[in-house]
Image (cartoon, rainbow, N blue to C red):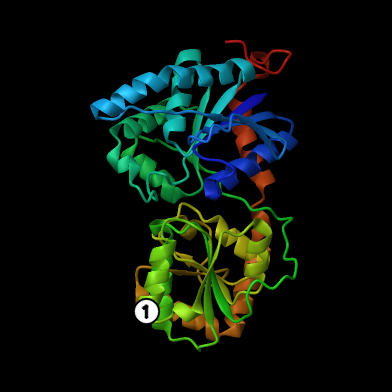
Amino acid sequence: MKVALVSSSYAPYAGGVEEHVRQTARALTAQGLCTEVWTVDRGEHLGERTVDGVRVRYLPTPLPARSGAALAGFARRFPSAWRAWARARAEFRPDVVHVHCFGPNGLYALGLHRLHGIPLAVTSHGETLGDDNGIFQRSALLRRGLSAAIARAEFVTAPSEYVLDDLRAGYGLTGGAVVPNGVDLDVTASGAVVQQPPYLLGVGRLGRAKGFDLLIDAFAAARLPDECVLVIGGDGPEEHALRVLAEQRGVAERVRLLGRLDAQAVADAMAGALAVVVPSRSEAFGIVALEAWRAGAPLLMTERGGGRGFVRDGEDGLLVDPEDRGALASALRRLAEDEGLRRRLADAGRQRVGEFSWTGVAAAYRRRYDDIVRPEALTSSGSTER
């Protein structure tokens, strides 16, 4: 069986979607499927590469816009873009095209499905809910495209009921299934010191949806001992604004922005933290929560989103509304001061994390592929004749 994972973004970019697709591609390949990743060329013209032993095609995805100049530009670019997608299909001959995080990538995959009858699957990662640019609120084309893809898809999944509920309410989904995110269980702390304790830690893209401004506000309001600092790992468009906010709140000397961290540095930073805080305004799932459990770190998780579906409040994490500054500040104080609570949360999280392997995620997709692609539909070379 051949599966094309059609992702809105991929390496060298980092994020939840990129990690989900990268790890899923690796696990599917290990389970015997022939897997490629098709992703959006953002103008770097990366062509084709091999990442973690998986072939990745970076494909152009121009879309029409309302202005005359934009329409003219689309008319010039579309023929060559469509040829690139058609060439990918002809060379790989996928049995399933599986869209992850619907965007321009999803529209082109939908076009291949309509033209060639390739079975289509859709996994939403919260793109209709947590996009800082509000693209689904602004683009009627994407809204219509996602609705059409959902109507035609053999299956639709998301990492949480929170995301599925939005697809049901706004995009015509009936049913749908949760396939959660996973975490690489083989990554362990190296013992390297990322920051001298005591410190609270946040990790993620520095965008508005991730709520790090809310975390800085609450940290300032919590009035923790001067030796306790807030460390944030990640990069993104809000970095300068966060530094300014820390100055305004009088905690600039106690807020450390480390920039993007690789997987090993994240594990090391979490292993030494008083707690890992996920303060997102909207979070489809939150792989960071699983990374905290893996590292044996206490977890303070946003209740706005998918966290409510897998974090057990008071047992393996604390759930809080990050937009309630008083509640978030109180939770920070509670974790900083109560060693017994930290230990209980960390121990429970460490016991839970084994439920969320990437092998399990890939197996959940594999079962669905098997349901829609019958053995008699496969040629001896493993591809479907269409």
Residue 350 is drawn in which quadrant?
Answer: bottom right
In the image, residue 109 above or below residue 177: above
Question: Which residue is depicted at the point 38% across and 58% down?
Answer: 208
Q: Is residue 2 rendered to the left or right of residue 224?
A: right
Question: How far across and how far down the image is residue 135, in percent?
Answer: 34, 42
Q: Nearest the camera: 204 or 182?
A: 204
**In the displayed structure, would residue 344 be above or below residue 190?**
below
Q: Secondary structure at mark 1?
A: loop
In the picture provided, is 31 more to the left or to the right than 107? right
> At which x and y percent is residue 382?
70, 18
Q: Residue furthest bottom?
A: 225
Would you place residue 377 above or below residue 346 in this image? above
Indicate the amino acid at tag 1.
Arg
User: With 145 as the anchor, is 90 left or right in this view?
Assistant: right
Q: Quadrant of the C terminus?
A: top right
Q: If the image is split into quadrants, where does the N terminus sit?
A: top right
Q: Nearer the viewer, residue 330 or 89?
A: 89
Of residues 78 and 372, the one drawn nearer to the viewer in this rendering: 78
Residue at numbered disc 1: 249
